[in-house]
């Protein structure tokens, strides 16, 4: 929030209001993306959001961007967790990725983004989006035979993307899940195209989360046929003791520091995360009403610090 033309009270009020909205949107998003990515604990998503908001936000030079879990990296994360075998090994790769991002920032490599063709960036983001759409349509309609984290074409259950579609076409649709999914999509599309909704101060994801929660409660009263099975819900375990809560934390497997696969995964994560960071940073600067420009090198350094910390905890 800029310091010009507003008092401290006004600034704090607006910051609190904006932060509250981001909180309500980010919490279910962090938990959901952690589950979709194949992370073994919901706490990984929450911690990523906290580190992105507090640590990266503090070191970042951007006035308009928000850091946290990245939907565009779901495919990369899921593939690397599967390739490395354990989540702890993946955390070590995240630490490596963060170190590489800090190195890129120190070497002033952020300016290289100016030489990346727009078609390459759009193609990359389009490919990731296509993967997510193809893999999530069956889940949108309630087909949950395969785990959501499996984003490869050929899955471990010997099915593939197209056989999942055929299963849905043949009638494997859960009515309750389909209603919630389709209504959520309608709301998201309407919020971006209907003028008075676009100008609303209420963000569309918050409306979708509230609607989905309300419909789940309603469907429970309607009973069989509408009732959602456990496989359709995000489960947040409630620990009965502090020691149980501490067991949710996972730490890097430093015994694999000599494994070349760790460094390969770290390089892939660093490249994908840095590219998305620079693209999003440029997009955020473009819509800044005060036309402020952020330092891409500073942002890479900030993101690197955040990823190192996220990997360690």
Image (cartoon, rainbow, N blue to C red):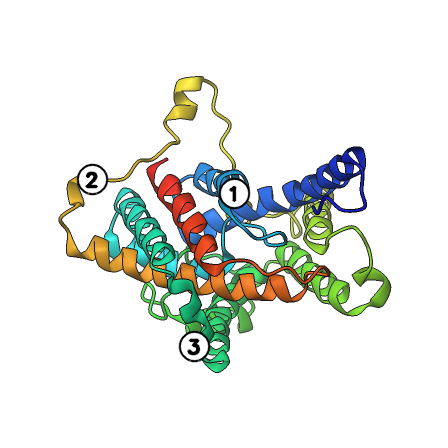
Give the mark, 1 or 2, whose residue is nearer the N terminus.
Answer: 1
Within-10-Å neighbours for mark 3: few <14, some 14–19, many 20+:
few
The one of 134 and 68 positioned closer to us in this rendering: 68
Q: Give the residue displayed 54% in from the left and 44% down from the top.
A: 57
Give the mark, 1 or 3, whose residue is nearer the N terminus.
Answer: 1
Q: Are marks 3 and 2 in contact (CB under 8 Å)?
A: no
Q: Give the residue displayed 35% in from the left and 42% down from the top.
A: 311
Label 1 or label 3, whichever lies nearer to me, is 3
Q: Is residue 221 visible?
A: no
Q: Give the residue displayed 75% in from the left and 40% down from the top.
A: 17
Whole-angstrom CA distance, mark 1 to mark 3, is 30 Å
Q: Is residue 16 above or below residue 70?
A: above
**Would residue 123 be found to the left or right of residue 221 on screen?**
left
Q: Residue furthest right?
A: 196
Where is residue 240 shown, x and y percent of the image? 48, 19
Disc 1: which residue: 49
Q: Residue furthest left?
A: 258
Numbered circle sitting on residue 115: 3
Whole-angstrom CA distance, mark 3 to mark 2, is 36 Å
Disc 2: which residue: 254
SS under mark 3:
helix
Q: Is residue 170 above or below residue 260?
A: below
The one of 141 and 62 positioned closer to us in this rendering: 62
Give the mark, 3 or 2, whose residue is nearer the N terminus.
Answer: 3
Q: Give the residue displayed 44% in from the left and 70% down from the top.
A: 113
SS under mark 1:
helix
Whole-angstrom CA distance, mark 1 to mark 2, is 24 Å
**Would residue 309 be found to the left or right of residue 234 on screen?**
left
Numbered circle sitting on residue 239: none
The one of 66 and 43 positioned closer to us in this rendering: 66
Within-10-Å neighbours for mark 2: few <14, some 14–19, many 20+:
few
């Amino acid at each position: 929030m800029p310091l010009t033309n507003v008092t401290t009270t006004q600034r704090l009020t607006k910051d609190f209001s904006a932060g509250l909205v981001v909180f309500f949107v980010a919490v279910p998003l962090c938990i959901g993306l952690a589950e979709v990515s194949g992370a073994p604990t919901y706490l990984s998503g929450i911690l990523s959001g906290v580190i992105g908001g507090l640590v990266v936000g503090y070191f970042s030079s951007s006035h308009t961007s928000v850091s946290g879990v990245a939907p565009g990296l779901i495919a990369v994360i899921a593939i690397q967790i599967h390739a490395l075998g354990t989540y702890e090994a993946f955390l070590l790769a995240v630490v490596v990725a963060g170190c590489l991002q800090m190195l890129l920032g120190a070497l002033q490599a952020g300016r290289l983004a100016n030489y990346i063709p727009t078609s390459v960036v759009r193609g990359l983001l389009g490919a990731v989006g296509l993967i997510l759409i193809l893999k999530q349509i069956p889940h949108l309609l309630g087909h949950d035979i395969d785990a959501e984290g499996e984003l490869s074409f050929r899955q471990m259950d010997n099915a593939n993307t197209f056989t999942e579609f055929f299963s849905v076409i043949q009638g494997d649709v859960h009515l309750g899940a389909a209603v919630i999914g389709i209504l959520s999509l309608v709301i998201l599309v309407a919020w971006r195209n209907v003028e008075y909704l676009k100008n609303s101060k209420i963000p569309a994801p918050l409306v979708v989360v509230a609607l989905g929660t309300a419909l789940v409660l309603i469907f429970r009263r309607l009973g069989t046929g509408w009732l959602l099975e456990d496989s359709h819900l995000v489960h947040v375990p409630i620990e009965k003791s502090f020691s149980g809560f501490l067991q949710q934390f996972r730490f890097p497997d430093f015994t694999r520091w000599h494994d070349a696969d760790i460094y390969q995964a770290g390089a892939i994560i660093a490249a994908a995360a840095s590219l998305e960071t620079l693209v999003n940073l440029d997009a955020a600067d473009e819509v800044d009403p005060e036309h402020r420009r952020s330092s891409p090198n500073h942002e890479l350094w900030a993101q690197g610090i955040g990823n190192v910390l996220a990997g360690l905890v």
